[in-house]
Amino acid sequence: MDYGNIMDVETSGASAQTAQQDNLGYSGVRASETMAQTDAGRMSQYRDMIKRVGKRYGIHPALIAAIISRESRAGNALHDGWGDYDTRRGAYNAWGLMQVDVNPNGGGHTPQGAWNSEEHLCQGTEILVYFIKRISSKFSGWSQEEKLKGGIAAYNMGDGNVHSYANVDAHTTGKDYSNDVVARAHWYETHGGFKI
């Protein structure tokens, strides 16, 4: 793929905090794989669309599936397409399967398409590519796979919160976002039907 091989990206998997979403008594790669597998049935309905979007943007479809799994549990965690309710603002912060940030104080994106549409997946994937490119410029000495992992972390918290590869997830949700997403992507590539 255009931005490195997701299967060559190292990962420690989900934190205990993230694994707790599913009441798992374990964390790490095994927890990420369990959560990816839990979402696999719902994810299958989006497989063809994810593969088309991945091909269009040069992003491995397993990575898009993994972000969908982490962000919205393949739609299962959404309320009419919305997620991440902000009680202070009295509004939702994110839209769709890939949870595009619509908070004016955050990403400030305008939702494109229905929450489960190809148009939405294109918007989310364009945002991911934008952050991979930002990380690639910021850390030109990193390997292709390190830049890819940094871009995944930036998708969650912005490139300004990525300061080093050793602590790439220091500021991400659960302090594990890129590691969890990468582990889920590995599962979707090998078991979920998202091979290129």
Image (tube, rainbow, N blue to C red):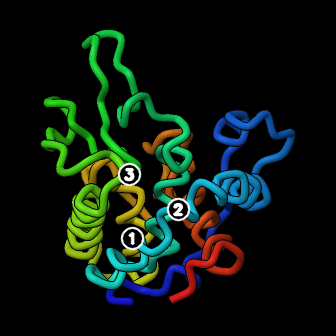
Say which residue label 2 marks: 45
If the image is split into quadrants, where does the N terminus sit? bottom left
The vertical placement of 155 against 133, above or below, is above
Residues at marks 1 and 3, CA–CA distance in whole angstroms? 13 Å
Q: Do labels 2 and 1 touch, CB within 8 Å? A: no
Residues at marks 2 and 1, CA–CA distance in whole angstroms? 9 Å
Name the residue type under label 1.
Met
Say which residue label 3 marks: 98
| Residue at position x 17%, y 50% in the image | 112
Name the residue type under label 3.
Met
**Disc 2, SS:** loop
- As drawn, the label of residue 49 is 1
Percent coordinates x, y for residue 179 in the rendering: 58, 60
Left/right placement of residue 28 relative to residue 177 reads right
Left/right placement of residue 195 relative to residue 165 reads right
Name the residue type under label 2.
Gln
Q: How many marks?
A: 3
Locate residue 83: give its quadrant.
top left
Residues at marks 3 and 2, CA–CA distance in whole angstroms? 15 Å
In the rendered structure, which disc, 3 or 2, sits on the residue that comes first in sequence? 2
